[in-house]
Amino acid sequence: MKIEGKDFFRETIHLDFSDLVNCTFTDCTLIYHGFGPVGMVGCSFNNVKWSFFDAATNTITFLAGLYVGAGPGGKNLIENVFEDIRSGKPIRKPSN
């Protein structure tokens, strides 16, 4: 669902399948479940709490496990993922 130019105040927002443009979030809880894509362009965040559940939690836990438990190769893999994120490279899905 596309939401444009809305000011959210003291709300809990489930982000999955949202396309948020030029929105402001103040004193909100933002929840991502990992079930669908989220777009955010030109949004501002003031005193927000981010929460991750379901598939999103599983993904973060998996990445953390690779970083600390898979030796230098795991740490390098995760550092490369974060570098791709910082540089704006798209996340690529493996081809079959």
Image (cartoon, rainbow, N blue to C red):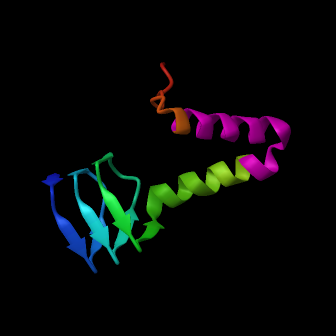
| x 47%, y 33%: residue | 88
Answer with the quarter of the image where residue 8 lies.
Answer: bottom left
Where 10 sits versus 16, above or below? Answer: below
First to last magenta residue range: 67-85
**Side (left or right) of 88 relative to 28:** right
Specify whether 7 is left or right of 47.
left
Q: In front here: 13 or 87?
A: 87
Q: Which residue is at a point 32% across and 48% down the rendered structure image?
A: 36
Residue placed farthest to the right in the image?
A: 71
Residue 16 is situated, as x and y percent measured from the top left of the image, at: 30, 55
The residue lying toward the viewer, choosing from 45 and 84, is 45
The answer to whether 39 is drawn above or below residue 50 in the figure is: above
Horizontal and vertical percent position of residue 5: 15, 57
User: Image quarter for residue 75?
Assistant: top right
Task: Report the number of numbered marks.
Answer: 0
Q: Position of residue 67 (x, y in %)?
A: 74, 48
Residue beneath the point at 45% across and 65% down: 53
Single out the residue that lies furthest toward the bottom: 10
Was residue 80 drawn as part of the magenta stretch in this picture? yes
Residue 71: image x %, image y %?
A: 85, 42
Magenta stretch: includes residue 82 = yes
From this view, report whether residue 77 is shown above or below residue 65: above
Looking at the image, residue 26 lies above or below residue 23: below
Q: Main secondary structure of the magenta part?
A: helix
